[in-house]
């Protein structure tokens, strides 16, 4: 069995702060191209990174403990033979308090080394987990900023 992408970060924030960044704060660390809702189970949102687009559904929410996203649609704007590999994959975010710190672990279930996009997507997750770490530790993340103005993106 191939290993799913998995990575943890440890921050000095409360589990609630970490949880909020995964529900109402996605624009602050992942991409400014986001529409829809991402705060409770059943919510759906679209997120884009210039030509790369995904439609996600929040499938599980346990406040301050866990958030799960299911990728419903995906288009990866890269020269891969298959550009929708994320469809059907799940991003499982586990939040665990450890004394004065909180460990956040992302398991991208289905993102395995046999995916065409594995290297690019792993690098992307490493970047965006660092962005999330920066957001939680300094208050300022490093989300993807789309080339088009936010108003033009929202109008689509």
Image (cartoon, rainbow, N blue to C red):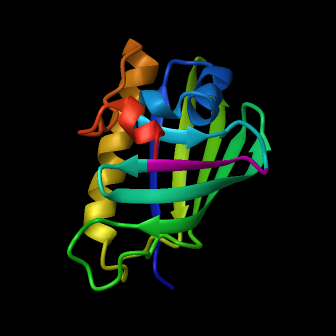
Q: Nearer the viewer, residue 115 or 85?
A: 85
Residue 137: percent from the left, percent from the top?
41, 17
Confirm whether the magenta stretch covers residue 45.
yes
Vertical position of residue 56 compared to residue 17: above or below: below
Q: Nearer the viewer, residue 106 or 102?
A: 106
| Residue stretch rendered in magenta on the structure | 42-47
Q: Nearer the viewer, residue 71 or 114?
A: 71
Q: Residue at x 72, y 31 (%)?
A: 64
Q: Residue furthest left?
A: 79
**Main secondary structure found in the magenta portion:** strand
Q: Quadrant of residue 121?
A: bottom left
Q: Residue furthest top?
A: 138
Q: Quadrant of residue 127?
A: top left
Residue 140: percent from the left, percent from the top?
36, 17
Left-right relation of 142 to 54: left
Q: Residue at x 37, y 79 (%)?
A: 115
Vertical position of residue 154 compared to residue 25: above or below: below
């Amino acid at each position: 069995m191939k290993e799913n992408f998995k990575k943890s970060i440890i921050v000095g924030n409360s589990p609630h702060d970490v949880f909020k960044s995964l529900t109402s704060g996605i624009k602050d660390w992942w991409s400014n191209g986001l529409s829809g809702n991402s705060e409770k189970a059943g919510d759906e949102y679209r997120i884009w990174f210039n030509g790369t687009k995904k439609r996600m559904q929040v499938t599980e929410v346990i406040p301050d403990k866990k958030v799960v996203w299911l990728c419903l649609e995906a288009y990866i704007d890269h020269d891969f033979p298959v550009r929708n590999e994320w469809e059907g994959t799940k991003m499982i975010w586990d939040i665990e308090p450890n004394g004065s710190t909180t460990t956040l672990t992302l398991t991208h279930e289905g993102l395995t080394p046999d995916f065409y996009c594995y290297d690019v997507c792993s690098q992307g997750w490493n970047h965006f987990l660092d962005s999330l770490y920066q957001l939680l530790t300094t208050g300022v993340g490093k989300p993807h900023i789309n080339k088009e103005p936010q108003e033009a993106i929202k109008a689509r």
